[in-house]
Image: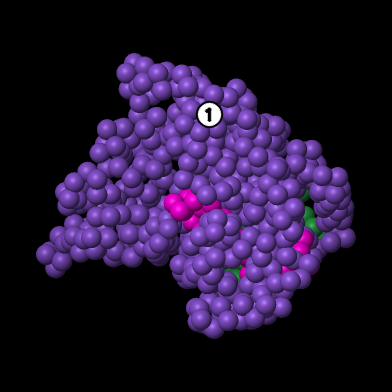
Chain colours: A purple, B green
Amino acid sequence: MYRYDEFDHAFVQARVAEFRDQVQRRLSGELTEDQFKPLRLMNGVYLQLHAYMLRIAIPYGSLSPRQMRKLAHIARTYDKGYGHFTTRQNLQFHWPKLVDIPRVLEELAEVEMHAIQTSGNCIRNVTADHFAGAAADEVADPRPYAEILRQWSSLHPEFSYLPRKFKIAVTGAERDRAAIEVHDIGLHLKKNAEGALGFAVFVGGGLGRTPMVAKKIRDFLPEQDLLSYVTAILRVYNLNGRRDNKYKARIKILVHETGTEELTAQVEKEFAALKESELKLPDADIRAIETYFAPPKLKARPEGDATVSKAVKADPGFADWLRRNAHTHSNPDYASVTVSLKGIGEVPGDATDVQMDAIADLAEQYGNDEIRVSHEQNLILPHVARADLPALHAALVEIGLATSNAGLITDIIACPGLDYCALANARSIPVAQEISQRFATQARQDEIGDLQIKISGCINACGHHHVGHIGILGVEKKGAELYQVTLGGSAREGSTIGEIIGRGFAPNEITDAVETIVDTYLAKRENRDETFLDAYRRLGPAPFKEALYGHEAKAA
Amino acid sequence: MMKIVAANRLTDGETVWLGAGDRWVDTIDAAHVARDAEDEARIEAAGKLALAANIVIDVTLVDVEIAEGRILPKRLRERIRAGGPSIHPEIGKQARSAAQHAA
């Protein structure tokens, strides 16, 4: 993991001191709310329905056990005993008192964490594949580049007042687990024919009220040109992005209105001027950052196969969990484990202080001291010896975090929705809980196979509903909640935006509607190997529309 | 249309309402209900004063009705704001009021 140097420590501590002073001036009345609001937002402090909310950055989703314990401590001491892991690989506390937040930030700084740039029209937390540095299908670890981007973008004077927020995601594998095509900039780390590292560059993806899939504007950008090229994109956006209308201010609108070809030409022109500037990354600098992310020295554990096969025979629960929640590691003796924060009927992404502490312990005991947060709102132990999987599973059962549902229908993404969020129009979490309970049994989930449900409580789409295989958007209609359903979305490579299937559903109808959709898929799929998404792409919306609304047409 | 004033307390963000004597109260049951335009203008002005005095933030007028003798906001958003997260009955104001009712 990256470790702060003296400059980083001084920088974050200075920022804490600055915010402490700003809070004091606010409390004394020296600053009005209008003056204070942009300052608190720059430090991740929002106001929601019931309280303030503090959003803490988890760079590219990487956490050490020490950091996780600190989050548990903050949950216990300053909040209500839990935290919410988000689709941005961040953590939100939903109940902090303003008077306590400077102290919380001070505690975070002790473990090299902060909340800077988790809000506002700046470059936000750079996200990455949660299996980075561990996955067997990876060309190279994307995190060193995410860290370079983090350092470059932190308080970047030119890009602190962009037209709108700006999100960058990086993956190092063909299989896109970081949803790069629905980010402002998506970077796909790859090797060219000569074996050199570089990036395919995607621009202008995003969700929200105008969902767009990013356009590829470069097939191969040499790694040393990363900052020059990203700067060129940001410059074109900063200059030409709309500032007159918040809803048209993201780069996706600029790309759409300018046209990909013209925008690419503008970026390339800026890049030509920057290419040989001080932004060119010296090879030594890249390699120096890479050393922070050197893979842990994993001991040979060849007994894994035997241990695992024995446990599979002895414990069907372990077999289910292994099948769903263990991911292939580059070292055959190891696996990356998804710790599901989607227990049946639980709140997606929530973890209690006790669970956070327990995960920290398990990461030390079995996980080579590493924890990741996935954008799917789960936790990951990226390096676990296969020989330790039965023991880890048993320990996770003890703390209620052994649900075997990674990628299944109950592994639902949901934003906080109207239960917390001041922007929401409808609740998300209760819908997720009810669907989870409806499809609770392992056999039924396994029969359905890979199926992603994503739920947002408003058009801002924090719950990524547009890219859910089944997407659910909560709206307010005539004072009541109503849920619109989209089908066929995907955030994987070749991302697609889901299509609205028809009229929305009341809260007491939405779970039935999902079940109807699932039953239609099961009835129409060619075989068990045809996933929901594949079947939808083959069949189109017609059979699902017929199943959902056909009886209405007949009645009319 | 009956209205109350809702806000969040500056120091801790807790949801509060303007009550009798222009005091900020932390249960919606104790909110002062404006039943005519004149009273509505008065409580709105009181809310703005409290914002300017750095007591509360995010001051909003909320449409309410009286149902079974209790103040009930028309919008679900404000009903959730008055109770707490619907998914966590053990947290927030609803937990306190449940404890009071039980006592």
Can residue A134 be seen in this snapshot? yes
Report x, y in % for residue A472.
38, 56
Count of numbered labels shown in the rendering: 1
Report x, y in % for residue A453.
38, 50
Task: Name which residue type carries label 1.
Answer: Val
Q: Quadrant location of the N terminus of chain A?
A: top right
Q: Is residue A556 magenta?
A: no
Horizontal side of residue A159 vs A394, given as left or right: right
Residue at horizontal 36 percent and vertical 17 percent from the top = A310
Report x, y in % for residue A395.
50, 21
The part of the image, by quadrant, that contains residue A26 is bottom right
User: A134 or A38, which lies in front?
Assistant: A134
Identify the secondary structure beneath mark 1: strand
Residue at horizontal 35 percent and vertical 54 percent from the top = A469
Can residue A374 be seen in this snapshot? no
Q: Is residue A159 magenta?
A: yes
Q: Which residue is mark 1?
A: A384
User: A305 or A343, which lies in front?
Assistant: A305
The range drawn in magenta is: A155-180
Residue at horizontal 72 percent and vertical 56 percent from the top = A283
Q: Quadrant location of the C terminus of chain A?
A: bottom left
